[in-house]
Each structure stands twice: as structure tokens, then as C-alpha cells.
Image (cartoon, coloured by chain):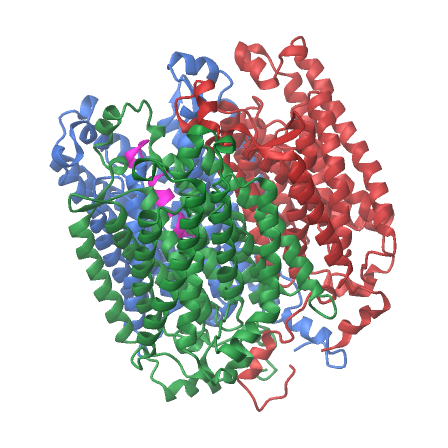
Chain colours: A green, B red, C blue
Amino acid sequence: AEGPRHQGMAKNTNMRWRLPLVCLLWEAAMIVLFGVFVRFGAEADAHWEEEKREMNLTSDIENDFYFRYPSFQDVHVMIFVGFGFLMTFLKRYGFGAVGFNFLLAAFGIQWALLMQGWFHSFKDGKIFIGVENLINADFCVGSVCIAFGAILGKTSPIQLLVMTLFQVTLFSVNEYILLNLLHVKDAGGSMTIHTFGAYFGLTVTRVLYRPNLEQSKDKQGSVYHSDLFAMIGTLYLWMYWPSFNSAISDHGDAQHRSAINTYCSLAACVLTTMAFSSMLQKKGKLDMVHIQNATLAGGVAVGTSAEMMLPPYGSLIVGSISGIVSTVGYVYFTPFLESRLHIQDTCGIHNLHAMPGLIGGIVGAITAAAATEDVYGKEGFIKAFDFTGEYKMRTPSIQGGFQAAGIVVSLLMALVGGAIVGGILKLPIWGDAAAENCFEDDVYWEVPEDEESDVYHMHNPDKPASP
Amino acid sequence: AEGPRHQGMAKNTNMRWRLPLVCLLWEAAMIVLFGVFVRFGAEADAHWEEEKREMNLTSDIENDFYFRYPSFQDVHVMIFVGFGFLMTFLKRYGFGAVGFNFLLAAFGIQWALLMQGWFHSFKDGKIFIGVENLINADFCVGSVCIAFGAILGKTSPIQLLVMTLFQVTLFSVNEYILLNLLHVKDAGGSMTIHTFGAYFGLTVTRVLYRPNLEQSKDKQGSVYHSDLFAMIGTLYLWMYWPSFNSAISDHGDAQHRSAINTYCSLAACVLTTMAFSSMLQKKGKLDMVHIQNATLAGGVAVGTSAEMMLPPYGSLIVGSISGIVSTVGYVYFTPFLESRLHIQDTCGIHNLHAMPGLIGGIVGAITAAAATEDVYGKEGFIKAFDFTGEYKMRTPSIQGGFQAAGIVVSLLMALVGGAIVGGILKLPIWGDAAAENCFEDDVYWEVPEDEESDVYHMHNPDKPASP
Amino acid sequence: AEGPRHQGMAKNTNMRWRLPLVCLLWEAAMIVLFGVFVRFGAEADAHWEEEKREMNLTSDIENDFYFRYPSFQDVHVMIFVGFGFLMTFLKRYGFGAVGFNFLLAAFGIQWALLMQGWFHSFKDGKIFIGVENLINADFCVGSVCIAFGAILGKTSPIQLLVMTLFQVTLFSVNEYILLNLLHVKDAGGSMTIHTFGAYFGLTVTRVLYRPNLEQSKDKQGSVYHSDLFAMIGTLYLWMYWPSFNSAISDHGDAQHRSAINTYCSLAACVLTTMAFSSMLQKKGKLDMVHIQNATLAGGVAVGTSAEMMLPPYGSLIVGSISGIVSTVGYVYFTPFLESRLHIQDTCGIHNLHAMPGLIGGIVGAITAAAATEDVYGKEGFIKAFDFTGEYKMRTPSIQGGFQAAGIVVSLLMALVGGAIVGGILKLPIWGDAAAENCFEDDVYWEVPEDEESDVYHMHNPDKPASP
């Protein structure tokens, strides 16, 4: 059982000094930057007792912690277990899927706290953080996890860390442009997280195109148990998506509504995914790849509009359509992208995040443009779109236009940013593996020598030791 | 490795047109019905600002979302990961267990929102929904997941969808009779969910009796890893059951008390299950089937009474007894039911849901009958049993009688409904598999060609390709 | 495949009467003690309506349930899925890892409700419980799960129950000394849970030293899928640790701050763990053992200080250091402890809990000693350290001294208690397995006869039936 373990020698994939150096230096940088900039926000600071009095709050329950912490934990599970396990479907890349996702997300949330902090929570030279910052950091990292899906199995952990550094930076700039300059609503991140993350990742994987990848074709599939592990990821993403889309919505009705719409959209999405998965296969059998991924498209596609007064039947329509688009994408677009456009998209993020993200942006623009004071109520209308201060005079149709502009900006940022970052990752210094060693944990991980086969033979000492 | 894949040809199990047709038509129906009927409830509507003022609420935290959303998410996990993974114990039916559970639950919650909405949230021709409706829809679907346990591995996905359609309908009628006509308390659903769901499923599997099922006997067992996957389901059901039983209880003490009682009951149940699992086996070894299932009986059995003033030691007693009954059921009743009554109960729902559900109904009736103003306090007494309006004159003993009547009604609805629905499912048009292909994912799923064995051999190219 | 199943005959490991006897008698004792002592606290009692009026609470949301229940559920998941699955890394001890953890924790939480209740919630001869008691019971059991990690695979279920009985008792005494007599702060349990639990477990495993354990060396490793199961445990512990450390902190800012600090510490810990895991291996490959365990050290190490005004960069430093210490421990200390000190530490709890626990105690003492009214605010200062009543005159530096004393007391209690309990567990009546049968589920569990191998052969009917 030594074969592939030595074939990687053609390229130097030894991480011994490079990975520790990057991890330790960057963590040291985080410590310094946190030391200079990061402080507790008013609701997490021991001065909260005085704050409460000043703000006339009569109870600790008014602390934002109680409005958002349960949703935060759900989002946290989506990032680490959801994305991590969703990518374990490959037969021999489970360690890399869960482990590298863990690594990049753990670094990314620290850097995101800083980047997003400078843009959104900066006052008197300090960044003041609270539970909403934690959620936003997780969201930002979510876009990196999405991009990771496209290059899964083909990059070294250092490349992933470098990509995370740049992508978090660009994400924060893009998010600032959308939310602050364009005054766009995007609580569930159809544009900022999914569209941006997916097109960024697709561009990166295009730049990193590997012409000989069929050399590791035998490892690009799943095995029975790896498909079940992946379903853990799928279900946690699916179940907690209502928390994802509502986590940073306004307190009260907006969080409530957002959760309901996401619940509805995802339920509908499962049915159309199953329908098309069966329909597009000659024998009518369901394909685990579709069930694992396309069932989630409904959550992506209501990301922008879920907190708006999109009625529940609207969510069902959006979810239904996105399930169809996503499943069709897996069957027809992914092979096309690979063969014609040289976009090797390991997890099919084009189907799960890119197209549904665009749908989400468009649905958000339409829903915003269609808003009326009648439907929202006078106060609700102003609150929902934050039409106050300098945006006091915005009308729904103008808002719709800005929402649409947000899609275009996100796309452009992703394509340009992805091209640049892809170029950086192409440098021959990051220790990526040769084509024949892609999708193989053995390159970067100590893999247990003995497979289950060993266990069977243990019981049979008179049999030879290897199958 | 082609054998069983072709044996299914005797029966036409090709889903290619049937499954998509059902999924798409039904989803279209959902969209139309949601469009006509479903609107946001006051707490999820953008008019909430005005609502707050009218109701003199000073804070957004008073929105029901914050009282119930964390419990909702726990219940959601129980339905999709809990039930889904609990059923992955079969060695070759993991895709079907998780995937079909996903499918039926995703359809079921939509239909349940409508059915329960018509009965409970209907006003001026519209159904107004909020987080409590989502929880109730999940609850309703829980009863279908239970019934699915009895027929696991023996039905086509279309049969499951048809069963879901009817069972959700009957569930809602039964629930309406119990909660509204009999004015019964059943927050954790011992009667409405477990007794009804289990006897419904047992009746269906009786009608669908397969005399030649021993032909797939080799696939009715577990393998080492499938038992671990199943434990994921078990533990999530076990851990979140306090949320299940408290999710729709009254705000405040009732939710609090319900969680405590369920926690206690489940803890006790684990000990008696382990005791009897060891005691009933000659070598004293523990059986994973019992640990996976009977440990949960304690949650079922306090479903009705957990929110009442059942004292914690009462919960321990109920949990202890139900663990014993359930384990004994697996050892003695299940084989009896199969051989004598021709009830083939794949997951043993008779032991996990039917008997404990009955216990739960009875314990609830007794606890209600034993209620006194002294124990509950004057206000607490009225609030706990909702003895207001036309029920102002009800006494605890009368309430106990109605609770008992609720058990009988649930049983009857389950038996009659199950017989009818079983008859419908027996029609030879739904594409179920032949007996020798039961418990085999290969019939309805694209199963990865190569097992782990392949991976070992990959490393050993000079060895023959099969073990 | 009969080999090892009969080798255990040398020792009598048959649990048939012993395990049921212990389980049933102890559960009966729990019922009696709960009947005599345990009642609902004011917030879980039906008199809550009157209580609310007396306490001038205007809303049910003020019930402690809504402040703590989401955190409770997260802690609950950590105990049962987190610890349970973390220990499934062994190739043939998955049932024992998850199942025995389930058993001991289910018993432990009942006994802990009583023990901690007598110390902390006792009034007029009764123990009044609420959600905070459930959390504390889970915490207490957490220390037993930690100790279980040291002796994993080498003890019978009865030994585990006996250990649980004594350890919960000693934990409660130690906790009482620290929290009530020394007036120490330790919300996340660096001292009470981790230091105590780990040194207790290490002492027990030292007393139970097995000189011939290399006879089961082949079963002490992992296989590919068991490492992925273990990652489920790791990630749930990692993700929910912010809830663990904040679950019983004061309402408001303290809970909020504690979650943020833990989030930061854990993120940093992942990077330094990955760095040292790669650095300490010749080929620079990452080791799953480190990723599964050392990444969690950051949560342990801020357990005491997270709720204090430890600034976020302080958390990053603590997390970074503990990741390094823990990883180095796995590489150098664990082998040393086994060969020189005869401490056989199956899961390496010395690295994950003992050393980080000590770090946590020390960091807590320093953070307390460094507290100033300026940083906390006048009211915040008093509230954070509860400097009221008889502790009104305590200064931060004195508090720091008492914190340090808490570490010493916990250590002493663990060493003395562990030695005594270890001695009890050494009695030859508990049915532990012979050295060659350690780390093997087959001793205490019905293990499915056929491995996955069987499935392959099913497809190959012309091949012989066993591998």
C-alpha cells in the first residue's frame, strides 16, 4: 500500500517549515492588531451596567446577545460542520475537507473581525466588537469556504491561507461598497457572500487550471460512507439556514420573517431537486451529489429577500426554481464548464452558490422595487429599508436599481479579485501537489496505515496480512 | 458486483417519470395554496411596529420569535438529522434513510403548514403563520417520520410521499379533535405525534405485509460504521428532546418545567435500557439496537405530562419504566409481532413510539386528574390547563377523563387511517421493490460503484480487483 | 473471525447480572432521593405567575430559561456528542466510546443534580432546580467525561459507573470549596472541571496501570473513518465552547464577553496547533490526533478568565500558547508519561485538559489580580467579582491569591481522590477485560458479525463468504 505515497515526490509538498511559518507569523500579526485595535463593544463591556442606565434599559435581556446568540451558534455550525462535512464526499479527502476548512475558517474569522471592524465598528481609533461582529466574521469566512469548494483537493494549506487573507480583504471592501455606499440590503448575503464567494472561487480555479487532472480521476468520486458524512454537512446547512438568513436582520419581525421565508424556500427546493435528479437520469435513480448540494440552493436564493415582505408563496417559487437550476447545473453545466471553459469546480459551487446567488440578488432587487407602504406599513417601510438620513428620499424602484448594481459590483470584484489572487496562488512556492496526487489526504496528512481491511484480517490470523 | 442490481427488474422500480411528476405537481399545488392562503402573522409582518404599540410591548424581545426560535431549531434538527440518521443503521440503506426522510419531511412541513393553518391559524380567509406554526409543522411531520420507521426499506419514495399527504391530513384532523374539541393538553405529543404516528405506521406495514422478506434478511442488519451513524441520530434526538417537549408550551414556567422533566426522564431511561439490554442477553453484552432506540422512550413517555406539575422524581419513574418496556419490546414483542401478527416493523417503532406513547398519554391523564390548586397556585392552575371560557368549570378529574379519551381517539384514527392508507399504498402503481431488493439503496439511488475496498486495491495495482 | 471473542474468557467480563444490578439499584436510589429532595425552582414552578408579580417582572422573557436555555442545549451537545464522538477515534471502540459516555453521563447528571443541589440550591430541606442546575450537572459530568478519556478502552461499564459516583461527589465538594469558601470565579471551569477532571483521571489510570497493554497495540490506532467520526466530536466541542464558558456567567455583558473571548481563543489555538503539528513531524504532515484535540485547548485555557475583562488580544495569546503546549504535549509528554510514569492516557487528556486547565487557572488568577475599577467601572467591578457582603473588602490582588489557591485545592482533590477511587476500581470484581482485549468493543457489545467486507461479497456470490 505504498504506491501513491511516493509519487508526490515530483513536487515538493513538504509543509514542515512553510506552513508553521505562515500560521505563526500571521497569528502573531493578529495578536498585535487585536492589541492595538480590538475592544469590547458596550454590550460586552463590564461598563454595561452604566450603559443600561443611560439607555434606559430595564433588563439584561435587552442585550443584543440574547437577540442573536442562538443564531450565531447555528451559523457557526454551518461554517465548521456544514461546509466542512459537505466536502467530505470525496473518498480519500475527508481529512483535508474538514481539516483545511477548519484551518482557513479559524484564521479567516480573526482577519474578518479586523477588516469588517475597520469598516463598520470603528470609533476613536478602536474596533468595538459584539455578537453581531462574530456573526459577520463567520459570514465573511463563509464566502471563503464557498471558494474552497471549487479548488477542493487541488491546493496546499498555505495556498488556502493566502487565498483566505486576500478574499476576506476583498469581501470586506465589496461589502462596504454594497452596504454603505450603495445602501443595499443583503442580510443573508446572496450577493456579498454567495455571488462574490462563488465567482471568486471559480475564477481562482480557472487560473489554477490543471490539464492533467484526469490522472486522479479515480479519487474524484465518493464511497458509500463518505456520502453519508457529506449528508451531515448538507443537513446542518439546510436546517440552520433560516438562522443564517435572519441572524443579522433587524430585531423583531424582520428576523422572524426571514426565518419563515428561508424555511419555506428550502422545503420547496428539496422537492424540485429530487424531481430533476430523478428525471435527468436514464434509470430515474436519485444522485447523492444533487441531494447533497442542490437542496441548499433555496437558502442561497432567498438570502437577500427573506427579510423583506416576500410572501411565503414567493419563497416557495424561488426555492423551487433554484432547486431546478442547481440540479440542471450539476448535470449539464459542470461538465461544460470543465471541458470548454477549463473551470474545474470540485464541489460544483457554480450550481450551489453562483447561479442561486445571482437569482437571490435579482429576487432581492425585484422585491425591493415592488415594496409599498401599504404592504410594510409606514414605519415598517422605513425600518425595513433604512430609508432615513441621507436615504430618506429613496423610493423602492431606486432601491431596486441599487440592489441590481450590487450584483454587478459583487461580480466584478469577484472576477477581478479572483484573477489576481489566482495569479498569486499560481506561484510555484506554495507546495501544491502534482495532478496525480490531488484529492488524496496522504499528501498533507498522516493517514492511518491500516484501513478497515486490517481489522477484518486481525480476526483471521491465518490469512495473509493484506487484501 | 452486478448481482442484486439487476434482480429488481422483476418489478418496475424506475422512478424517472413518476417521482418527478408527483414532486412537481404537488409543489405547484403548494405554491398555489400558499399564494391563496398563507400570510405572515402579526409578529412576522412588517406592521409589527404598529402591533407593538397597540399591544403595549416595549421591546422587540417580546416577539414570540425569541421565546421559541431556539427550540424550533432543535426540533428541526431532530426531524432531519435525528430521525434521518437514526434510520441509517441498516448496512445498505443509508441513502434511503436520510434521503427519503429528507424528502417526505420537506413536503410534509409545507402541507402541514396548510392543514394545521386551516384548523388553528385561520382568520378572514387567510392562514397567518409564525414560528409556532413552523414548530407544529415539524411536529406533524415527526409523526410521519415515525411511521416511516416501520416501513423503512420496503417502500418507494412515491409511496412515502403519498403516505405523507394522507398522514399529515389525518394528523391535523386528529390534533384538532384532541386539542380543540376535547380540550386536551399534549404539548410534547405523546398522543398526537407518537401514539398516532406509531399505530398508523404499524397498521400500514401490516397491510403491506411481505411474506418473502427473509429474502433480504442479509441486508436487515447493521455494520460497525452504520451503527455509529445511527448513534448520531439517537444522540440528537435524546439531547434535544427537552426542546421538543417544551417548544410550544406556555411562555415562562411551563417551558422551563417541561425541559427539566424531559431531561430527567431521558436520563433515567438510559440506565434502565442499559440494564435490560445486558440482562436479556445470555453473555450480558449490550445491544446497539436498544441503545439507539429504547434510550429515547423516556422522551416520548413524558410528552404529555412534562409541562404539568409532574415532579422530577415522577419523570425519573416514567423514564425508568419506559426504558424497560421498550427494551423488553425489542427482545420479545418485535419478533412476536412479525411472526404472529405479520407486522414487519423495521425500526421497532412499536417499542420506541407506540408503547411509550400510550404510557405518555396515560401518565398525562393521571397527572391532569391529580392536579390541585394547591400544587399549581390559583392562577397557575387555570393557566396550565387553560380552564377559561367554556372550559371554566372543568375539574381535574374531568380533564383526566378527556385526556384518556384523547388516547382512544388517537388510536382509532391511527388504525382506521392506517388501514385505508395502507390499502392505497398496496396499489401496484407506486414502484416499490421486490422482496429480495428491500433494504437496498441500489434500487432508487445511484450508489458509488466502488466501495472502500477499491481504495485499498488502488494501492495494490498488482493484486486482483476484488477482495 | 472468532479469535479475540474467546480470548477474553481468561477474565470474566460477563456483565449480565452486575451491570443491570448497579444500574437498577442506583436508578432506584435516584428516584427515592429525588422524591425526598428535588422540587421545581420558582421559575419552573406553576406558581411563577405569583412570583412574577412579587418580583415586579413584567414579562415571561425575564425567566432565567430564556437567558440560559440555548447555552444549556449547546453544553448538552458537547457532553454527549462532543465528548462521545471525540473518543470514537479508535478503530474498534466506537460503541464503547459513545455508548459508555452516554451511560456514565446519564447517571452522572442525576447524581450531580443532587450533590450540587445540596451544596448550592438547598432551602428548607428541599433542592430547588432550574435550568442553571441542568447546566451545572452537565458541567460536573464533563469532568467525568474528561477522566474517561484517560482510561478509555481499559475499563468495564461498571467501573465507569463507580468512578462517576465518586467523581461527581468529589467534584461537588471541590466546587463548593472553590466557589463558596474561597469565593473563586470559575465560570468556564478551568479549575473545577478541567484541572480537577484531568488530574483525577490521570491518577486513576496510573493506579490501574496495565503493564501488558502493548498486547492490544494494534487496536490503539484509528482508521480513516473513525478519524472522521472523531472530528464530529471535535467540531461540536470547538463550536459550542463559547456557550460552555458563558453558560452560567452573569446575565448581560458577562455572558456576552465570555462568548467573544472563547471564540477568539479557540480561533488562535487552531493556527498554532496546525503549525506545531506540521513542524514536529519530519515530513511536515498534519496529525489528526493533534487537530482533534489540541485545537480545543484554547477553550479550556480561557475557562476562568473569559468572563473577566480579559481583552480579546489576551484571548488570542492564551489560545495560541495553549495550542502549542497541547501539541507539544502529544508529541513529547504522552510517550514520556507512559514509559516513565506509567500513566497510560488513551486520549491524551494531559495535553487537552490538564495543562490547559492549569494555564486557565493561572490566567484567571492574573486577570483577577489585574482588575481595576477603571477597566470594569465601579458597578461592573463589584458585579464581576461579586465583591459584596462578606467579600466587600476584597481587593483584586487578594482575589488573585484565592484564585491561585483554587488551582492548588483542585489539584490536591484530584490527586488524592483519584488515588482512592483508582484503588477501589482495582478490586477484581468489576469485570474489566484482559490486556489483549482492551480497546475492543466485542467484550461488552454485540458487534455486527459482518463487516463491510460482507457487503462486497454479497455482490460476488461465487466467492467464499469470509475475507
Residue occupying image coordinates x 65% and y 75%: B449
Q: Nearer the viewer, residue C379 or B210?
A: C379
**Magenta-drawn stretch contains C241:** yes
Place of residue A456 in the rendered image (x, y in percent of width and height, measured from the top left): 60, 73
Looking at the figure, which quarter contains the N terminus of chain C?
bottom right
Q: Position of residue A304 (x, y in %)?
A: 46, 48
Image quadrant occupied by the C terminus of chain C? bottom right
Q: Is residue B302 magenta?
A: no
The x and y percentages for residue B335 are 79, 50
Q: Is residue C450 above or below residue C142?
A: below
- Asked where in the image residue B37 lies, by quadrant, the reply is top right
Residue at left offset 30%, top offset 75% = A424
- Name above or below for residue C35 compared with residue B35: above
Magenta residues: mostly which secondary structure?
Answer: helix
Residue B417 visible to the viewer: yes
Residue at the limit of the structure toward the bottom, as seen here: B462
B292 versus B405 height, above or below: below
**Is residue C96 or residue B393 the one in the foreground?**
B393
